[in-house]
């Protein structure tokens, strides 16, 4: 395993957000965290890369406690793609090159430049090298952010809703790419998502969260209606297509009453 989390707890003031979270991230697998808004998914990712300091519990990366790494060491091993990244007056090339910063010595090397070009190419951004990110659409900028994560050649990629701003074509292309890089033993990915059916199509393993707790940790073959209904409070039917489960909501009245939306 590349990442091990044990009894992780975190609070914002008096509000407990993560409650005794424990799981392992296996090498070279795409694992997706699923759950309703406010369940603690984003906070979990921020605790795993050192942005937030947990109240208690431990996070071990490659067998060593995260707290024992320097910030530079963490940046070399873990890439984080946030759900919201504010674009700036910087070209796509320079934005992606920043992902090499933890590896750069006194100056940028030809290898840094080669890897930057390769990452932009993998994300289909060949025509945007010199485009400023503040002139891009949300989806284009999201692809730049993913390229910046890839260029650092991390052992783990933490991704908060990586496909949320993308159209269907680029959403599927991005998830196919993530699937390819984990199967090619390039990295391990832990991502949050809201689209269950897309997650079920591409991911290897799933962590379901509700109210700051992990309610289930399963492979796709173990997905059941009961697991989903417990987390989302919506009756569903789970069907299968080409060895992947997909979910059909049966009724939305219970979900509406629980959401506070009327």
Image: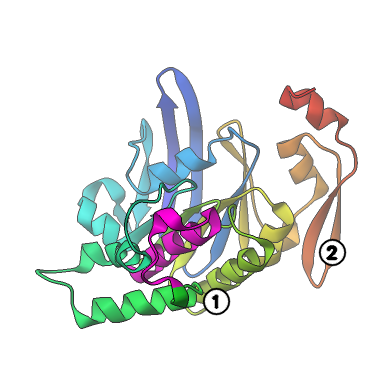
Depth check, mark 1 against mark 2: the one in front is: 1
Dot 2 falls on a residue whose secondary structure is strand
Mark 1 / mark 2, whichever is N-terminal: 1
Magenta residues, as a range? 128-153
Please name the residue that numbered disc 2 is placed on.
Answer: 240
User: Label 1 belongs to which residue?
Assistant: 180
Quadrant that contains the C terminus: top right
Q: Quadrant of the N terminus?
A: bottom left
Quarter occupied by residue 118: bottom left
Q: Is residue 155 left or right of residue 43?
A: left
Residue drawn at 84 percent across, 29 percent down: 254
Q: Is residue 125 above or below residue 195?
A: below
Please identify the residue farthest to the right as the structure is shown: 250
Q: Considering the whole magenta stretch, tell me its main secondary structure.
A: helix
Residue 62 in view of the camera = no
Instruction: Look at 85% across and 35% down and name the residue there.
Output: 252
Q: Residues within 10 Å of mark 1 (few under 14, many from 20)?
A: some
**Is residue 175 or residue 139 the one in the foreground?**
139
**Residue 109 on the magenta span:** no
What is the x, y in percent for residue 201?
70, 65
Q: Is residue 141 magenta?
A: yes
3D distance between C-alphas at marks 1 and 2: 23 Å
């Amino acid at each position: 395993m590349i990442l091990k989390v044990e009894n992780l707890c975190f609070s914002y003031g008096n509000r407990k957000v993560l409650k005794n979270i424990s799981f392992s991230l296996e090498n070279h697998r795409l694992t997706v965290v699923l759950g309703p808004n406010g369940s603690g998914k984003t906070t979990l990712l921020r605790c795993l890369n050192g942005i937030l300091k947990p109240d208690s519990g431990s996070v071990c990366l490659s067998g060593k406690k995260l707290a024992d790494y320097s910030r530079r060491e963490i940046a070399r091993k873990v890439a984080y793609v946030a759900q919201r990244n504010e674009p700036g007056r910087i070209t796509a090339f320079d934005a992606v090159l920043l992902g090499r910063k933890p590896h750069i010595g006194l100056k940028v090397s030809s290898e840094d430049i080669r890897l930057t070009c390769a990452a932009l190419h993998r994300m289909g951004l060949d025509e945007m090298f010199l485009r400023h990110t503040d002139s891009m659409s949300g989806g284009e900028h999201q692809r730049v952010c993913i390229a910046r994560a890839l260029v650092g050649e991390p052992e783990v990629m933490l991704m908060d809703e990586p496909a949320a701003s993308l159209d269907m074509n680029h959403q599927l292309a991005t998830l196919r790419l993530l699937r390819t890089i984990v199967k090619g033993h390039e990295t391990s990915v832990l991502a949050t998502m809201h689209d269950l059916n897309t997650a079920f199509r591409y991911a290897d393993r799933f962590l379901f969260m509700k109210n700051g707790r992990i309610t289930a940790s399963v492979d796709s073959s173990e997905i059941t209606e009961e697991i989903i209904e417990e987390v989302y409070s919506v009756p569903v039917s789970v069907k299968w297509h080409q060895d992947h489960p997909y979910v059909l909501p049966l009724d939305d009245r219970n979900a509406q009453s629980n959401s506070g939306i009327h």
